[in-house]
Amino acid sequence: MTCLQKTQPFLLLIAIGLGLGLAQVSWLSELAAGLIVPLLALMLYATFLPVTWGSFRQTFAKTKVVLTSLAINFLWTPILAWTLGALFLRESVDVWVGLLMLMVTPCTDWYLVFTGVAGGDVALATALLPVNLTLQVLLLPVYLLIFAGMVVEVDPLNWAQGLFFSLGIPLILARISQETIIQLWGEASLDQVSQKIGVVQLISLNLAVVCIFAAKGHMLGGHLGLWLQLLAPVSLFFLINLLLAYQAAQLFRLSYPEFACLSCTTLARNSPLSLAIAATVFPDRPLITLTLVIGPLIELPVLTLLSQLLLQIKNQPRIWSAAPHTTAPPDQD
């Protein structure tokens, strides 16, 4: 994980502050509005480029962890997110949809950092990445129609067009780029490009956040309580899923590294993907977009605390007893 990736929470705060400053200049605000979708499309292109079908081969070596992770992320979490929104955000439907979009997309980058800090199985977490990314790309449109459609009106034509521009075009271009690079320079070159493309992903994401707040920052004046609105449902999401991951680890007798990996991959969320879709599918509902920017500012400190909590669990035998303990055989004379 690069230094730029590790400092992403601070860069996000700087991007928000810079965007709010630019929002005071009317012509810059108008210019920024037109740059949001292209920057987010570039970010997704950089996200999709390293993902190949060959990446799936090593994922299912640890079946219990993988299947439990997929069940929590793609079956349980959408229901939990919708329920938390119904309990806390019924009077703010756009925030409710933003929360839903944030929660149904598992993270594909930062969670590797927190898995490593918590002493988890980073190799397994890395192997899960392409599966999580592929499934959320396929299932997010379904979640939007089923769950968001209960809360706000979703125009099928705008929905299809938005998904094509936000997901389809970057995905197609990434696939074309993969084939071109492999044919011209070989698979080793694709690996080298993939290692460097993360910088493009983070830069385009932060520039997109600058543009979002430059174009929509004036809305914050009437929604200063947005942070507080999100605090309770986001915190409950983390608490409930952490307890669920712990119980699953006890049930299936996972090792601690597997448990830490399961916890991080079922808690960390992929706000950039949801952000790109929200900007195109819901262009007339900017509060959804703002929710997806503010959500990670609550999420990242919680994940930092979570990684330390996991280490405490690891060091407390009375708490962590999922994996059978083994003792070394006595020395033989």
Image (cartoon, rainbow, N blue to C red):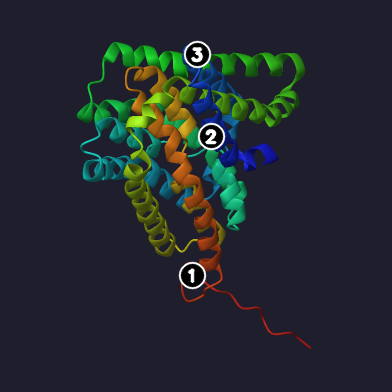
Question: Residue 325, located in which quarter of the rendered image?
Answer: bottom right
How far separated are the C-alphas under marks 3 and 2? 18 Å
Asked whether residue 265 is in view, the answer is: yes
Q: Say which of marks 3 and 2 sits in front.
A: 3
Which residue: 43% across, 26% down? 217
Give the amino acid at mark 2. Pro
- Residue 228, horizontal then vertical, whole percent: 35, 45
Please say if the residues under marks 1 and 3 sit with CB atoms less than 8 Å apart.
no
- Residue 36, horizontal then vertical, whole percent: 49, 18
- Residue 296, horizontal then vertical, whole percent: 47, 40
Secondary structure, mark 1, is: loop
Which residue bears the numbered disc 3? Answer: 169
Considering depth in this image, is 88 or 128 the residue closer to the camera? Answer: 88
Which residue bears the numbered disc 1? Answer: 320
Considering depth in this image, is 207 or 175 the residue closer to the camera? Answer: 207
**Quadrant showing the N terminus:** top right
How far separated are the C-alphas under marks 1 and 3? 46 Å
Which residue: 51% across, 62% down? 309
Secondary structure, mark 2, is: helix
Mark earlier in primary sequence (1, 3): 3
155 left or right, relative to 107: left
Mark earlier in primary sequence (2, 1): 2
